[in-house]
């Protein structure tokens, strides 16, 4: 007689930065993807903007290293199976043909400055107004705010990694001094704090 322990347990879900769905591919395979937003088409059908990460090679000190690359794609709701316990209520909804008010105002202001030519005062005023509109939109939309913050973090981390990659560890012992030791130690402490913060999720 079989027991619950004998039954096959479902595989744990992968870590993700948003709610996951089980996507049925055209060839019959399945994969997990993060739902970034849902789109209501004019024919009343629902689609999902999804994201996965695929292996990708990045050049570091003249050699390729494995670095995940984000891939965005659209899939009809009919191919996306919801997963129990995922926070789909946080997913923003878009509607085909409907432009958010802040985007419409940004377009109007850019069109207006284009008509006035390259007047420095008009360009400066428009830039400030557009930046303020974008900031307000980011602050009022949790998904936009998270996306903007994620983009800034990713840009900073990539720049840091590339800057560190130009330092050849084999040559470091010849030039190291107390100042370099202090900088490397401080950098290691920052990295340890970042790793600790994501390992707690």
Image (spheres, grey):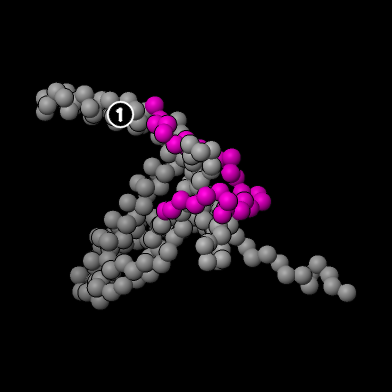
Q: Nearer the viewer, residue 65 or 40?
A: 40
Which quadrant is the N terminus positioned in?
bottom right
- The answer to whether residue 173 is visible is no
Find the residue positioned furthest to the right. 1
Residue depicted at x 66% and y 51%: 84
Is 95 magenta? The answer is yes
Residue depicted at x 68% and y 64%: 10
Q: Is residue 196 above or below residue 110?
A: below
Is 172 magenta? The answer is no
Residue 193 appears at what percent x and percent y? 45, 55
Q: Is residue 73 above or below residue 29?
A: above
Q: Give the residue number, with chain letter if any, for mark 1.
A: 106
Range of residues picked out in magenta? 72-101
Is 155 displayed left or right of 5 in the figure? left
Q: So how many labels did they put on this image? A: 1
Is 20 displayed left or right of 175 in the figure? right
Residue 151 appears at what percent x and percent y? 37, 47
Residue 141 appears at what percent x and percent y? 46, 34
Is 8 displayed left or right of 64 in the figure? right
Per the image, label 1 sits on a secondary structure element best described as helix
Residue 157 position by quadrant? bottom left
Q: Nearer the viewer, residue 175 or 51?
A: 51
Find the residue positioned furthest to the front. 43
Residue 115 position by quadrant? top left
Q: Is residue 68 above or below residue 21?
A: below
Is 76 displayed left or right of 113 in the figure? right
Find the residue positioned furthest to the bottom. 170
- The answer to whether residue 97 is visible is yes
Residue depicted at x 58% and y 51%: 78
């Amino acid at each position: 007689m079989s027991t619950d322990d004998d039954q096959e347990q479902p595989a744990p879900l992968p870590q993700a930065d948003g709610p996951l769905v089980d996507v049925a591919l055209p060839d019959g395979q399945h994969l997990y993807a993060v739902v970034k937003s849902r789109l209501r088409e004019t024919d009343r059908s629902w689609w999902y903007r999804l994201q996965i990460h695929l292996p990708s090679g990045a050049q570091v000190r003249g050699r390729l290293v494995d670095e995940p690359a984000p891939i965005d794609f659209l899939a009809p709701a009919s191919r996306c199976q919801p997963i129990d316990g995922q926070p789909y209520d946080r997913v923003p909804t878009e509607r085909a043909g409907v432009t958010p008010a802040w985007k419409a105002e940004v377009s109007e202001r850019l069109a207006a400055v284009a008509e006035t030519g390259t007047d420095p005062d008009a360009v400066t005023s428009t830039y400030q107004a557009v930046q303020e509109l974008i900031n307000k939109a980011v602050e009022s939309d949790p998904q936009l705010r998270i996306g903007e913050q994620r983009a800034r973090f990713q840009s900073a981390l990539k720049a840091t990694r590339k800057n560190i990659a130009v330092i050849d560890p084999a040559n470091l012992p010849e030039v190291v001094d107390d100042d370099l030791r202090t900088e490397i130690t401080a950098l290691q402490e920052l990295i340890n704090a970042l790793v600790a913060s994501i390992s707690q999720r």
